[in-house]
Image (cartoon, helix red, strand yellow):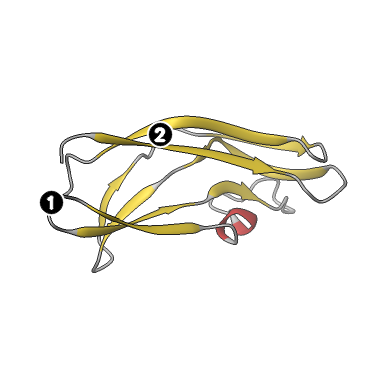
Amino acid sequence: MGQEFALSYNLTNISGEPQTVHEVNPLINPTIYSTNGTVVWAWNPPGMNFITTIPSKAGNWSGPLEIPTSALSSGQKYVLSVYPLIGAITTSAMAVGDYSIGESLMINTTIGIA
């Protein structure tokens, strides 16, 4: 309680060919939810949208991102949800909130606070 834990990530293009995508920097925005689905904490940094081509076998990685536990209650369980902010290119250049590729890669894990 009152400490931080670290989150690191690595997203690699394993398709065998370059992929042109809509990406946001930073690439992730982790969110912590209570068991009833209420957002308890989210990073929400300012982001920059751009179109990029990710070469085959190349990846984006970062971390560790320190996540505070000060907003969490002792003895409770929470869900940490994270996915890359990456989407397909649309006809309108970059549709804000189009993270269709990233959402399919979402990882959720339960965390407990002692």
The amino acid on which the numbered mark 2 sits, given as a three-letter code, is: Pro
105 relative position to 17: left or right = left
Residue 84 in the image: above or below residue 52: below
Gap between marks 2 and 1 measured at Cα: 24 Å
| Residue named by callout 2 | 45
Residue 14 % position (x, y):
78, 48
Q: Classify mark 2: residues with Cα within 10 Å, few (<14), some (14-19) or many (20+).
A: few
Residue at 60% in and 39% down: 10
The amino acid at mark 1 is Ser
Residue 114 x/y as whole percent: 16, 50
- Local SS, label 1: loop
**Which secondary structure, mark 2?**
loop
- Residue 22 in which image quadrant: top right
Residue farthest to the front, as pictured: 114
Judged left or right of residue 65, residue 2 is: left
Pick whichever, 59 or 114, lies toward us. Answer: 114
Q: Residue 108 vs residue 83: left or right? A: left
- On residue 73, the disc is 1
Badge 1, how many Cα within 10 Å: few under 14, some, many 20+? some
Badge 2 or badge 1: first in the primary sequence: 2
The residue located at (17%, 44%) in the rendering is 71
Q: What residue is at 76 percent from the left and 35 percent from the top?
A: 58
